[in-house]
Image (cartoon, coloured by chain):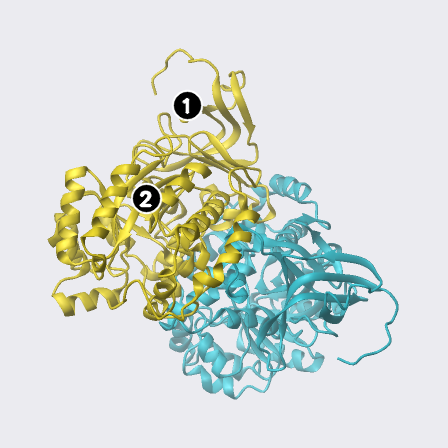
Chain colours: A yellow, B cyan
Amino acid sequence: MTQRPAPGPADLVITGCTALVHDPAERVGFAEDAAIVVRDGVITDVTTAAAAADLDAAERLDARGQAALPGLINCHTHAPMVALRGIAEDLPVEEWFNDHVWPIESNLEARDVELGARLACAELIRGGVTTFADHYFAMDTVADVVAETGLRALLGQAYFSSQGPEGREASLDFALRRAGAADGRVTTCLAPHAPYTVDDADLAATAGLARDHGLLVHLHAAESRAQSLHSIARHGLTPIEVLRRAGLLDVDVLIAHGTGILDRDTAALRAATGRVAVASAPRGYLKFAWGPTPLRLLADLGIPVGLATDGAASNNSLDVWESMALTALVQKSATGDPRWLTSRQALHHATLQSARAVGLGERIGSLAPGRRADIVLVDLTGPHTQPVHDLAATLVHSARSGDVRTTIVDGRVLMRDRELLTVDVPAVTRELAQRLPALVERGHGRRIQEYDA
Amino acid sequence: MTQRPAPGPADLVITGCTALVHDPAERVGFAEDAAIVVRDGVITDVTTAAAAADLDAAERLDARGQAALPGLINCHTHAPMVALRGIAEDLPVEEWFNDHVWPIESNLEARDVELGARLACAELIRGGVTTFADHYFAMDTVADVVAETGLRALLGQAYFSSQGPEGREASLDFALRRAGAADGRVTTCLAPHAPYTVDDADLAATAGLARDHGLLVHLHAAESRAQSLHSIARHGLTPIEVLRRAGLLDVDVLIAHGTGILDRDTAALRAATGRVAVASAPRGYLKFAWGPTPLRLLADLGIPVGLATDGAASNNSLDVWESMALTALVQKSATGDPRWLTSRQALHHATLQSARAVGLGERIGSLAPGRRADIVLVDLTGPHTQPVHDLAATLVHSARSGDVRTTIVDGRVLMRDRELLTVDVPAVTRELAQRLPALVERGHGRRIQEYDA
């Protein structure tokens, strides 16, 4: 970093922590007894506690015994679906969608989305997540909740072709109107649902809009191997090949799940001219009995894979820390190779790869000068994280989301010592409980969409 | 339960919780706004909060907003190995044993075991575990720590045939001397290491001792499929068949891991006349790239499968709550059936099946009159556990070990509102840190045993 004269007092100095840092080759390492200096929402220095001892600062956080990490990033979720956590359990995905979730979502009102989003933001902040990529309905409401709770988010208004062109137009309208909202913490994207619910013409039109407006596209594709095989049987193409034909691999695209990405998809992925990324939410794949996202294949292709949780109606939580641990565990198991997906690899997924996946590869994902000050402090003094022989392993395999004590976004403290500062959880759960009977009613026989993929 | 005149004031009444209960068919259910009455370390009543409102009690715990569960049971661990948490990462089991753990364990002193056990007990109590089955060395020390920390434990002194008959004799001596220690909270067992480190003669002698003294045998067997295939190649028998030939399936036996139990083992398991149980620690199996314990096969055979974590040197934590969630997730994935291993099944494993696995099927594992008062209270008010549509799913898939607020063993509170009352964690970690350099030194080239299975 360049050395300039000190520009007046810092807004925030965090001292005494062990800071997760990346070297120029992006290898994960740790700076002990470090200090992180924040000004105007940006990290201006990562130095030693000694060097920062006399620094003038509006606020100092003593973080001895804690690790400082870049805030976690949930690269694919449907935040408001926390309202449906546990509503449809132990079911195959077809029944989960057709008999439960899509009938219930036909009752959804903006107030449900608002309360759900607020509850989700509380959970995210408590779990050390500072950015989430949300793909849902009534997204103006979600953008307002993001503004209010202080998180960072990539937001997209979901649409199906069954809505006609209005769905796509509303998604674009939202993306253009709300880009840069919440003091720049909101970025936006186009959010077609999936190749099995959005037709080829709509996908191609979406690619055109993405190109014209410089927007990222966030969608579900190749969710499971069964889905890919079904797509081949029906169209002669895998879902990834469908995206390619529509031009969606030639824009920035975030593909949720991809557990059905097949070896034959390497050709389409290699030919991509856009920035392609995948979001992986391993808990839900185990629960639906899908396979894992093929991380080794994607690593060979240089495609970043970000961590995600999907919505809580399938995943039961928005715990990205758990996604990090499960990514390591499931990858070892699936490849039969205990040396693969080390803790440092998992931390690379959780930091720089996740930042790239949500289109913020230059702004977040690392504790480095010039990056936004999205920081979490993790307590290492609990008996379950002691002793520390290998801090990367401690973080991935021993620590839990509940060990995050402090969550900071853009230099603003959103949780301090486990206390949420921007969400009133009891008020949200109280009102949500009153609304739930109407929300979960399925007697009407409607559904917002049909699953047949 | 029979109605008798009230026998004076209760020692403890927990009121307002939602209590996990089992019906006569052992189905898991929930009693809302319940009260649990404890006298002399035993649950004497599970009733309504209203019925218990006027009950005279030395202590009352207001548990509104919390679930009361039978304390979790860690059916297979090596508690003192928390000292080696993270010491040997991302390795196949052969290297893990031969190049790291067994060389390091040749340095082990009783004081290391003591500090490790104390740290482990702190972690267990904080994770809602009230009973653990420990298989390790210097077990008198562990028994002392169990007495001091207030937990319940099934303890066995491990041995290899390489120690000569002294190993087996020391295991028996420990089992006979310390049975019933710590006011009855310590039960004991014989603890041969595994069929690949204990020879046939020693295994048969162990079976004889178990029969003669009415002792349970706790050992590793069929840890992985590779191990079973290796055993067939070497002996013409699977590890389970080796146990059968030695007579170990005709006594009470707790088999750790069993991920290598094969279809052909059903014959040996069906022929067993002892109480056979299996302990499953799914996190470590993923990490070593082993398959899962075949729970469906074992369920068909009526063999209880208890939850476990193995030691923290491989598993990185003693988090039985996580084992419960992973059991559900991994079983769905491995069988390809999202309907299998429901949350209620997972809770049955965590309660009655785990109690049976450690030989305490009549004493713990259920909140019911006559059972020991081993109870944990779990906070359900966090944003990640709200709303509650299905409490079984909330507990298994949304709650985390860190949501346990209060841990009670034999009616004694060991953790209250997350505060540990019987372990001084900073003192333990401080002394352990001083001892670690000597403990982890491997320059001597010794190891306590050779892995070749």
Residue appearing at x 37%, y 15% in the figure: A3
Q: Nearer the viewer, residue B410 or B59?
A: B59
Q: Which mark is residue A40?
A: 1
Left/right placement of residue A120 relative to residue A258 reads right
SS for callout 1: loop
Does the rendering let one see residue B91?
Answer: no
Left/right placement of residue B290 relative to residue B178 reads left
What separation in Å lies between label 2 and label 1 (alpha carbons)?
24 Å
Q: Position of residue B163 (x, y in %)?
A: 60, 65
Q: Amino acid at mark 1?
A: Asp
Whether labels 2 and 1 belong to a single chain: the reply is: yes
Q: Is residue A261 above or below residue A372?
A: below
Q: Which mark is residue A153?
A: none
Q: Position of residue B256 (x, y in %)?
A: 53, 69
Residue appearing at x 11%, y 65% in the figure: A236
Left/right placement of residue A268 relative to residue B331 reads left
Residue appearing at x 66%, y 41% in the figure: B426
Report the quarter where the C terminus of chain B lies: bottom left
**Which is closer to the viewer, label 2 or label 1?**
2
To which residue does mark 2 refer? A155
SS for callout 2: strand
Q: Amino acid at mark 2?
A: Leu
Left/right placement of residue B18 relative to residue A84 reads right
Looking at the image, how many numbered discs can be counted on the residues?
2
Q: Position of residue B393 (x, y in %)?
A: 50, 64
Q: Nearer the viewer, residue A199 or A12?
A: A199
| Pointer 2 chain | A
Does the rendering let one see residue B60?
Answer: yes
Report the quarter where the N terminus of chain B lies: bottom right
Q: Is residue A196 above or below residue B103?
A: below
| Pointer 1 chain | A
Q: Nearer the viewer, residue B67 or A66?
A: B67
